[in-house]
């Protein structure tokens, strides 16, 4: 009889990971409640609970909670989850710790499509240009994949990254040229590009849910394959993985996730970059654990940023995207310095 010896550390990590994920769920639940209470008008927690449970609370508090803060909190959860998973997939796909959803041209494609729709087609409502954002995100991701596949060796992480950077700068220049000549497009783009959860439309969130659900399923299915891809293309092929199919699945998942998030709330930066690294400290590099941890921690970061933005300049608000950039900037600098030090 053959006995398989498993390292004690490997056995111990499973309960530890599970416990940390449970803690992350609890933190997310607390932040959701805090998000319902915080704002230009503070509502006591007991009043929030009554408004949510029996709906017999103060009419004004009930209107604020259900009409404004519940949709906004749901929006933060969905957008944070989508951006976090997209970032984790991008870092696993490109094997680049500095990768985020913007690397695939998703945000640039969505921005260009929205500005084009506003400037030339007269689309002004979010429910109208959100579909252009999704189409632009998909077109940008496909273009990067095609450009990265040209030449010898096919699609490689370096070629895809370079193609993404080139396309992002190109579309950014085109977007700037359009908004400078069309004031209406500039006004819409200026608010949207800051990354905002203000005025979250429940109907819009409901229409975006199928895209988000499809992206989550593709991301979860790609997790084991990304573990093989992290060992190198040759090793992944030797393990029976189809590299082209893995990349296509991951690119499609990133497009659906990041495209949906960008369409709803604008190009919020750093969530897809920062959160996967934090999750990796908790779960390790295994994507089967990394992806769930990221899906829990990313909404936490966006909720924290949104709550800070609501209360820091009462009665005015600071957009959540601006607060996330302020929080994520120092982390990004530290990450770059750490990687440069490791290369020396």
Image: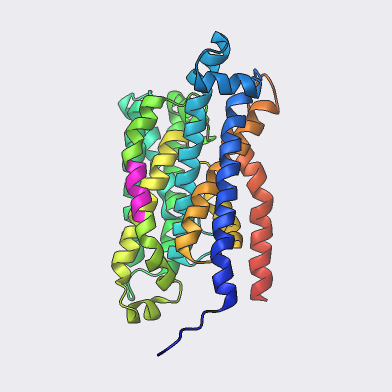
Residue positioned most to the front: 1
Image coordinates for residue 52, horizontal then vertical, percent: 51, 22
217 in the magenta segment: yes
**Which SS does the magenta portion mostly show?**
helix
Q: As rendered, which of 319 and 147 lies closer to the eye?
A: 319
Image coordinates for residue 184, horizontal then vertical, percent: 44, 23
Q: Is residue 221 left or right of residue 279?
A: left
Q: Quadrant of residue 333?
A: bottom right
For image coordinates 34% across by 52% down, the residue present is 217
Q: Quadrant of residue 39?
A: top right
For image coordinates 70% across by 25% down, the residue present is 313
Image: 167 above or below 311: below
Residue 74 in sight here: yes
Q: As rendered, which of 23 and 285 lies closer to the eye?
A: 23
Q: Which residues are magenta?
A: 211-218
Residue 269 in sight here: no
Q: Is residue 208 left or right of residue 339?
A: left
- Look at the image and tell me in which quarter the C terminus lies: bottom right
- Look at the image and tell me in which quarter the N terminus lies: bottom left
Q: Quadrant of residue 242?
A: bottom left
Image coordinates for residue 244, horizontal then vertical, percent: 30, 68
Residue positioned most to the top: 59
304 in the magenta segment: no
Image: 176 above or below 86: above
């Amino acid at each position: 009889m053959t006995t398989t010896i498993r390292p004690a550390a490997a056995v111990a990590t499973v309960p530890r990971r599970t416990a940390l994920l449970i803690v992350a769920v609890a933190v997310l639940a607390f932040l959701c409640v805090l998000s319902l209470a915080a704002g230009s008008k503070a509502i006591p927690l007991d009043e929030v609970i009554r408004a949510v449970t029996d709906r017999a609370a103060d009419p004004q508090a009930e209107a604020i909670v259900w009409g404004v803060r519940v949709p906004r909190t749901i929006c933060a959860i969905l957008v944070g989850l989508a951006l976090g998973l997209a970032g984790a997939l991008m870092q696993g796909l490109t094997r680049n710790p500095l990768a985020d959803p913007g690397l695939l041209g998703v945000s640039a494609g969505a921005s260009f499509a929205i500005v084009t729709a506003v400037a030339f087609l007269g689309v002004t409502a979010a429910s109208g240009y959100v579909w252009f954002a999704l189409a632009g995100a998909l077109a940008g991701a496909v273009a990067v994949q095609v450009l990265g596949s040209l030449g010898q060796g096919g699609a490689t992480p370096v070629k895809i990254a370079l193609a993404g950077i080139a396309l992002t700068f190109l579309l950014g220049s085109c977007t700037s040229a359009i908004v400078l000549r069309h004031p209406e497009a500039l006004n819409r783009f200026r608010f949207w590009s800051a990354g905002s959860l203000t005025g979250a439309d429940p109907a819009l969130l409901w229409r975006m849910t199928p895209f988000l659900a499809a992206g989550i399923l593709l991301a979860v299915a790609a997790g084991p394959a990304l573990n093989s891809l992290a060992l190198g293309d040759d090793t992944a092929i030797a393990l029976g993985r189809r590299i082209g199919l893995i990349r296509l699945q991951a690119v499609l998942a990133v497009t659906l996730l990041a495209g949906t998030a960008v369409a709803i709330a604008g190009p919020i930066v750093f969530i897809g970059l920062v959160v996967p690294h934090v999750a990796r400290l908790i779960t390790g590099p295994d994507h089967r654990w990394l992806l769930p941890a990221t899906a829990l921690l990313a909404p936490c970061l966006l909720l924290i940023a949104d709550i800070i933005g609501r209360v820091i300049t009462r009665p005015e608000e600071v957009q959540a995207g601006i607060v996330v950039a302020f929080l994520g900037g120092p982390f990004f600098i530290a990450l770059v310095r750490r990687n440069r030090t490791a290369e020396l």
